[in-house]
């Protein structure tokens, strides 16, 4: 299990690609931390950031950083502010960073400009807030149109985010360039503005000027999402100590809460199977299990030679005969992904086997969901189990015409759900176009 990496929202930036690893993307929570800027004209603008300082409602002179630059500098970056013109004032900076430079110059506060796609909160060295570009422009306009502009910055407050969970902009996106038909990420978990243990060796801002030391801090990144998933895996393991890592991974993925493909950049390439659901993961009903031999067949199918294979396996594994090598899309994986060419008709199949871990004498029926112009056929549509740990196999066929995926990186998001009335076992069925 590993974090996905923080190189989003660009495509094909995932760093965690191995199919035996649970790759975790980061999402927001329904608690958002905001910092309000109150201008002298009474207008209040909400920004983001972790501001633990209070100005007690006192207003201070407000200056634009570009107008108070030291003579030897060309902009308002760190170390380039004229302390004589800045001291005792709030500085408007045209960058996402700059609170440390403002602090060094003697400013009492800083208003920063948030970059597009950046929604996570940074910890500030002095009273500060990071505003979106349009709100930043409002402050600049106020300064330019007011003889003696004033402002104050309020201490951080937590508000309810009714749009959560959302995929974090920084969370890396698929596909994997090495195995594009293994959907990565696998799962999404909370990773933005997470209260976490923190080392007292460094300050919460990592700045030499910051003399604060804390045991806990607010952190952001896929490295904050991964521990949530690790905890869920450990939780599932307590109920099923004999399950394989693949079975636990399957339980986490197939019980995830679906996310909205039309509202998230990259769709499944951003969130995988969806938002992690700890309570459902312990009782998935069916699991897609896989063994070491399955992964070896996959690596051989991907073209790994014997030397490379043994570096990964740590033993004397060899590739089987060509006829038994596994296509990536036919690995017994909890998600189903195929890569096709743009503007071409396609017909792809996925072969899967599920193991019954729900109830004996149970019957599961298949239901497919799609908003794309694809046709999905599941054969058989009904799986009947007489006992626990019994296995059943099925085939999923997905077809589409030339107009379904007309351009590079166009996507068709669908899903397959097996249900016995008590369990819902959901798998993304994802087809995307890519020129190769």
Image (cartoon, rainbow, N blue to C red):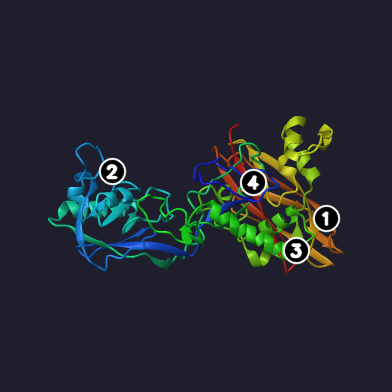
Residue beneath label 3, please? 285
Residue beneath label 1, please? 392
First in sequence: mark 1 or mark 3? 3
In the rendered image, the residue lying farthest to the left is 147
Q: Nearer the viewer, residue 40 or 400?
A: 40
First in sequence: mark 4 or mark 1? 4
Other residues around mark 4 within 10 Å, as few (<14) / some (14–19) / many (≥20): many
First in sequence: mark 3 or mark 2? 2
Q: Position of residue 194 (x, y in %)?
A: 50, 60
User: In this rendering, does residue 131 appear at all?
Assistant: yes
First in sequence: mark 2 or mark 4? 2
Q: Nearer the viewer, residue 346 or 429?
A: 429
For this view, does 388 lie left or right of residue 92? right
Marks 4 and 1: CB-CB under 8 Å?
Answer: no
Residue beneath label 2, please? 79
User: Disc 1 and disc 2: Cα gap in Å?
Assistant: 66 Å
Mark nearest the camera among 3 and 2 is 2
Mark nearest the camera among 1 and 3 is 3
Q: Position of residue 337 (x, y in %)?
A: 66, 45
Marks 1 and 3: CB-CB under 8 Å?
Answer: no
For this view, does 204 lie left or right of residue 69? right
Other residues around mark 3 within 10 Å, as few (<14) / some (14–19) / many (≥20): many
Residue beneath label 4, please? 183
Q: Nearer the viewer, residue 383 or 269?
A: 269
């Amino acid at each position: 299990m590993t974090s996905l990496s923080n190189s989003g929202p660009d495509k094909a930036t995932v760093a965690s690609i191995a199919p035996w690893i649970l790759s975790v993307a980061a999402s927001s929570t329904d608690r958002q931390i905001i910092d309000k800027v109150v201008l002298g004209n009474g207008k209040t603008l909400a920004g983001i950031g972790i501001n633990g300082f209070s100005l007690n409602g006192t207003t201070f002179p407000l200056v634009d950083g570009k107008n108070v630059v030291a003579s030897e500098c060309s902009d308002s970056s760190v170390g380039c502010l004229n302390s004589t013109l800045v001291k005792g004032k709030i500085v408007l900076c045209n960058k996402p960073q700059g609170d440390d430079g403002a602090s060094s110059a003697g400013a009492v506060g800083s208003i920063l400009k948030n970059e597009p796609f950046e929604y996570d909160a940074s910890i500030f060295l002095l009273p500060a807030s990071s505003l979106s570009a349009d709100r930043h422009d409002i402050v600049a306009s106020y300064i330019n149109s007011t003889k003696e502009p004033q402002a104050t910055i309020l201490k951080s407050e937590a508000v309810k985010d009714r749009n959560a969970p959302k995929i974090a902009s920084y969370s890396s996106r698929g596909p994997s360039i090495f195995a594009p038909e293994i959907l990565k990420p696998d799962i999404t978990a909370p990773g933005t503005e997470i209260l976490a243990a923190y080392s007292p060796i460094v300050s919460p801002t990592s700045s030499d000027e910051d003399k604060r030391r804390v045991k806990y801090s607010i952190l952001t990144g896929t490295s904050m999402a991964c521990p949530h998933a690790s905890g869920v895996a450990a939780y599932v393991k307590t109920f099923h100590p004999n399950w394989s890592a693949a079975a636990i991974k399957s339980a986490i993925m197939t019980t995830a809460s679906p996310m909205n493909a039309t509202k998230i950049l990259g769709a499944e390439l951003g969130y995988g199977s969806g938002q992690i659901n700890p309570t459902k993961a312990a009782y998935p009903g069916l699991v897609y299990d896989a063994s070491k031999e399955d992964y070896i067949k996959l690596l051989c199918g991907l073209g790994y030679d014997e030397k490379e294979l043994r570096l990964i396996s740590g033993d004397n594994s060899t590739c089987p005969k060509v006829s038994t090598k596994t296509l990536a899309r036919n690995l017994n994986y909890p998600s189903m992904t195929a890569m096709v060419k743009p503007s071409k008709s396609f017909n792809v199949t996925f072969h899967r086997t599920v193991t019954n871990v729900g109830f004996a004498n149970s019957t599961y029926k298949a239901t497919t969901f799609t908003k794309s112009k694809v046709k999905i056929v599941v054969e058989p549509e009904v799986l009947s189990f007489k006992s626990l740990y019994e296995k059943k196999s099925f085939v999923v066929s997905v077809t589409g015409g030339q107009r379904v995926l007309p351009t590079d990186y166009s996507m068709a998001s669908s899903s397959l759900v097996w249900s016995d009335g008590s369990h819902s076992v959901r798998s993304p069925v994802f087809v995307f176009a890519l020129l190769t």
